[in-house]
Image (spheres, helix red, strand yellow):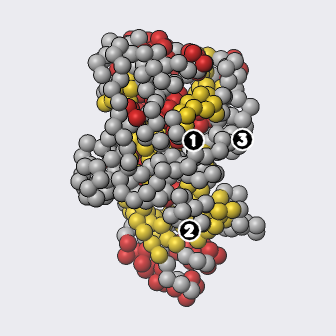
Amino acid sequence: MKIAIRSVASVLAIAAASTLGFLGKAHGSRTPKQIALTEDGYPYVRGEYLVKVRSSAALERLLESQYETIGAVARKSPVMSANNGTWYKVNLADDYKLRDAILSARESADVLYAEPNYVYYTSNEPEKNIPMPGNKGKGGPDYQEAPALPVPPVEDPQVSGMYGLNKIGAPQAWQIINGSAKVLVADIDTGIDYNHQDLINNIWHNPGEIPGDGIDNDGNGYIDDVVGWDFRDKDARPFDDNSHGSHTAGTIAATGGNGIGVSGVAQQASIMSLRFLGGTQGSGTLEDAIKAIEYATDNGAQIMSNSWGGGGFSQAMFDAISRANDKGILFVAAAGNSGTDNDKQAQYPANYELPNVLSVAATDSADKLASFSCFGLKTVHLAAPGVKIISTIPGNQYQALSGTSMATPHVTGAAVLLKAAYPNLKAKELKALLMDSVEKIPGLNGKVSTSGRLNISKAFAIARANFGEAKTGN
């Protein structure tokens, strides 16, 4: 049997200048991790690899058989169960010797894949805002009670300055439906200020969990996961220490009609906060990203928003997103900010060839492709506003940021509106509607596969023709 240890010679080899930097301490609770580079230039956590084996016993045999070569006892921890095997993270001090051990395992039919624990980063422009301090601590999230919304709704004062909403036809779509608390969207990012005045009404509250009792009430393996989970710090407080996650969450579904601040593309939704990125660099690992995707898949998310990228091809992440696809979950991903062609130089997770992945480029207020935005006629599907986008950041504040990170949540919010109006739509139908309804932009010809920019108003017209009248009750 041929063993598929993906690109071992290139993926696992370490560049001569192996030290790139550190994953900073997240709220002082983690030891900094040294970052190395594969010979292809992808950052990963030194000494950490994800290995897919047919059984735990197979991994034990591998590590025991290589004890003399490795010179140390490896630490392993399960990451994800997948078809025909299980993914484990293996941690060793000696990176070079671990590489040699995995290379030698090619003779074992029990070892299916092996890859570095890649590092990912937020997909906004390098010119970043100063991070807000995280509100961390032991126990469950210290969320506040959501206030009553005004009846009738009161116009949000900053909406007039949000050109993106008008570009994509959001106000017209709101005449049909402005969202629904029944649509659960996972914001996989740096966490969210879940007490923000413009987000608090749309934060998901896990119905199976009793806040603060220290018990895993719903039996999902996470204690007090009331608003989501922090995979970076391993606790129930996925609070944003960077601003990026709160910003993307606000574009998806900042509360509309509360007379405060801004409005999301969807004015109502349930936003699940899943933090795996953080710190001043907005960085996180492959292991934690996979666990966040798995959590969203297992806990009812219907749409996932992913404004981050990095690393090479990961079979482990492919497996995780594929499992989400099997459950009909749309996976919206930022195309990247290196200004390069994704057809020639892949950006992950946007480049995974799976039916539920929707890759998003960024445009400006003049409908021009942003100078930083990645593109790709075959691999990037559509564009959305992503330059100087006003949204929420921690501490009841607002800020304009740019990046494909900002374009992606426009598409996510549009998917929320469609899902609210047509609850039976799965990833395949949502993706098709969003792609088929774009506003054709001459400057996007040859740059994205649809040659267009998001238009949710047109998407509703196509949906009505194909699926009948929208459901308007929230």
Image location of residue 76, percent across then percent down: 45, 72
User: On the image, numbered disc 3 is attached to which residue?
Assistant: 127
Measured Cα–Cα span from mark 3 to mark 2: 27 Å
Measured Cα–Cα span from mark 1 to mark 3: 12 Å
Image location of residue 210, percent across then percent down: 25, 49
Image location of residue 13, percent across then percent down: 67, 67
Residue drawn at x 69%, y 62% as measured from the top left: 21
Residue drawn at x 57%, y 42% as measured from the top left: 243
Q: Residues within 10 Å of mark 2 (few under 14, many from 20)?
A: few
Image location of residue 363, percent across then percent down: 66, 26
Mark 2 belongs to which amino acid? Thr
Residue drawn at x 55%, y 20% as measured from the top left: 158
Left or right of 73 in this view: 405:
right
Q: Note whether residue 146 is visible.
A: yes
Q: Is residue 312 above or below residue 248?
A: below
Front-lying residue, 83 or 90: 90
Mark 3 belongs to which amino acid? Glu
Q: Residue furthest right?
A: 17
Q: Is residue 309 above or below residue 138?
A: above
The mark that comes first in sequence, 3 or 2, is 2
Secondary structure of the residue carrying numbered label 3: loop
Residue drawn at x 54%, y 58% as measured from the top left: 26
Q: Residues within 10 Å of mark 3 (few under 14, many from 20)?
A: few
The mark that comes first in sequence, 1 or 3, is 3
Mark 1 belongs to which amino acid? His
- Picture disc at residue 31: 2
Which quarter of the figure has residue 181? top left
Q: Note whether residue 426 is visible.
A: no
User: On the image, numbered disc 1 is attached to which residue?
Assistant: 244
Q: Is residue 453 above or below residue 313?
A: above
Secondary structure of the residue carrying numbered label 2: loop
